[in-house]
Amino acid sequence: MLAAAGNVVSRGAWPDKPVRLVVPFPPGGTTDILARIIAVELSREFGQPFVVEHHAGAGGNVGTEMVARSPNDGYTLLMGTVGTHGINRALYRKLPYDPVKDFAPITLVATVPNVMEMNAGKAQALGIRNVADFIRYAKANPGKLNMASGGNGTSTHLAGELFKSMTGSFLTHIPYRGSGPAVMDMVSGNADVMFDNLPSSMPQIKAGRLRALAVTSAERSPALPEVPTVEKAGGPALKGYEASSWFGLLAPAGTPPEIVNSIQQAVARILGTAAIQEKLLVQGAIPSGSTPSEFARLIDSEQVKWAKVVKASGANVD
């Protein structure tokens, strides 16, 4: 305990009060799950509470804009996502923040495959056992299946749009205010298919309420090794399909570099522990970590990648 206290003092005055960690989506989704795991560990590292706050809405834009407009004193952080910092610039015609200019990247936390899933009972009733069955049914019954997502512009939305464009399937998109509510409607049978971040659906898959048809990553997930990738399960039409998600910490632009570096180094230590690695892997997330500059380069490259997907899908939001 004395050693830990010494580490806190050596970092200077920051933090001398609680730090807000904003999740721009509702509770229960992957962003929330990862933020809570990291917040607990950061609280131990720094000796001050890191408090998770939810500010959901508009595909993550509400909470993300709030952080962008917050004081750059290190006391407000964001758990950003591929949606808020990789997709939304291309998707929203009037994005209320600049993903690059308004933020100081701190570190990537984890990458996560999405999982193509159905309500288990509905899949059985329709005779859908795999991706090939799904494509055949969707093409034979255009407009009869709906596709849930965690909101317009989220990776759960664009992963489905990419699938639709590559297979020629017509699925009616139903955006929810986050993955948590969408998964609940999947379980109740009100939604037919979803390309959800794996951690937020894992409990329902393990319980048998949702059927995992495939994962959207280039390789199988260690958390669901028996489930094939969309590319392998879907045949020639889905060659090259890949739509993984990522999550990372950011601060308002202008946050002092010593604070950014202190948080980055703490997260690197956290992600390097066997206990946290196991906790994330069980959830279906792959611990990543990065320097601020590496994270900045990832954000730049992801905006280029997803702009192409958005354009090809025809998806746009005012």
Image (spheres, rainbow, N blue to C red):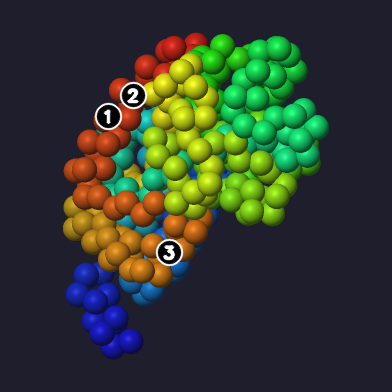
Q: Residue at x 53, y 46 (%)?
A: 226
Q: Residues within 10 Å of mark 2 (few under 14, many from 20)?
A: few
Q: Residue at x 49, y 59 (%)?
A: 282
Q: Measured from the top left, where is residue 7 in percent x and y?
A: 24, 77
Residue bearing the label numbered 3: 278
First in residue order: circle 1 vs circle 3:
3
Q: Measured from the top left, where is residue 139 in percent x and y?
A: 66, 13
First in residue order: circle 2 vs circle 3:
3
Q: Quadrant of residue 147?
A: top right
Q: Is label 2 or label 3 in front? A: 3
Amino acid type, residue under disc 2 in the picture: Lys
Q: Residue at x 64, y 48 (%)?
A: 205
On the question of residue 245 being in view, the answer is no
Whether label 1 touches label 3, CB < 8 Å: no
Residue bearing the label numbered 2: 305
Whether label 1 touches label 2, CB < 8 Å: yes
Q: Is residue 128 above or below residue 25?
A: above
Give the alpha-carbon distance from disc 1 to disc 3, as whole Å. 29 Å
Amino acid type, residue under disc 1 in the picture: Ser
